[in-house]
Amino acid sequence: MTATNLHGIELRGVHKRFGTFTALRDLSLTVRRGELLALLGPNGAGKTTAISLMLGLRPPSSGTVRVFGDDPRHGATKVRLGAMLQESDLPGTLRVSELVELFASFYPRPLSTRDVLNVADLAAQAGKLGSTLSGGQKRRLMFALAIVGNPDLVFLDEPTTAMDTQSRAAFWAAIEHMKASGKTIVLTTHYLEEAERAADRVAVIDKGQLVASGTPSEVKASVDAAKVRLRSDLVLAELRALPFVTRAECDDRGLATLHTRAPEALLAHIVRAGVAFKDLEVTRASLEDAFLSLTAQA
Ligand SMILES: Nc1ncnc2c1ncn2[C@@H]1O[C@H](COP(=O)(O)OP(=O)(O)OP(=O)(O)O)[C@@H](O)[C@H]1O
């Protein structure tokens, strides 16, 4: 097996232009087999465009896209992929189970309709017409259609939008199950706490460019990852001069906020220097804080 084949997906120097507008700029990204990658970015960042390239729905303007070492537009690769896109029209005259069966017929080794309806929490709606489903049920149906072909690689574009708490829990349980069986999953979401919990790696795209990638912890550590709050006799200039401090503020009641990537080292220095302090509070950045900082949306 070559190094390329070890990758589920490999994008190299990908540009995608729509007329004069550049939606993706020099995007290089790999997704390893069996991992869950969360593609994050503000509205219009280029996430859906990137997914459409990985699915082979569109060619890149330049650069290369490989899925399981091959062009995703090849038929042999296509049948290994499943996708749940943001907008999809379905024939409203077919029942849920009929739609699942129809999609199953496109694939060489599909899952059983019964299993898929159970996994997607849709067993109770099996006899309903597609057009009569609620918004959340429609998302669950789209999920069912994405997985019925038993794909090795699944793309899920904002899968949990419109799902209620119970559907969301069922969805994440299904994802865990798919991960455990070795599937590769790429999803986009605006729910960063979900990405933080479920993703092996995240990639943050802003204005068509990759601005960060790595495990959620690595991405958090790439920004001012923690805030240390305390009261001391140090004045603002002294606080700012402390090692490991990237930024510092002080409110009018003397409570200082020190931004740092190394809260432990900063505190060790403060203690060693014999600085007296009280009201200590250390807060780690969430993935949401890192995202806002990376995409300058704060
Ligand atoms: N077919 C197209 N023709 C022209 N511009 C397009 C086309 N498809 C996408 N774009 C533009 O490319 C940019 C990226 O769009 P894309 O849908 O990939 O963003 P996104 O990150 O998925 O956003 P969202 O979070 O809102 O779904 C946007 O500015 C969009 O208007």
Image (cartoon, rainbow, N blue to C red):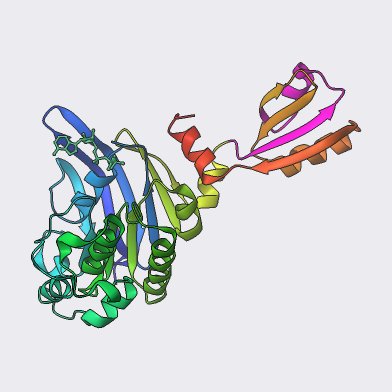
Placement of 111 over or under 163, stated as above or below: below
Foreground residue, 244 or 201?
A: 201
Compared across the picture, whether 84 is left or right of 60 comes to right
Q: Position of residue 282 (x, y in %)?
A: 72, 41
Residue at image x 36%, y 37%? 42
Q: Is residue 226 magenta?
A: yes
Q: Is residue 4 visible?
A: no
User: Which image quadrant for residue 102?
Assistant: bottom left
Q: Is residue 52 magenta?
A: no
Residue at image x 46%, y 54%? 194
Placement of 241 over or under 77, stated as above or below: above
Q: Position of residue 168 (x, y in %)?
A: 41, 61
User: Which image quadrant for residue 121?
Assistant: bottom left
Report the magenta residues as a range.
224-246
Foreground residue, 39 or 64?
A: 39
Foreground residue, 143 or 167?
A: 167
Judged from the image, the quadrant occupied by ligand 1 is top left
Q: Is residue 143 visible?
A: yes
Residue at image x 13%, y 53%? 57
Residue at image x 46%, y 35%? 294
Give the position of the N terminus as an image quadrant.
Answer: bottom left
User: Which image quadrant for residue 242?
Assistant: top right
Q: Position of residue 7 (x, y in %)?
A: 31, 62
Placement of 246 over or under 216, stated as above or below: above
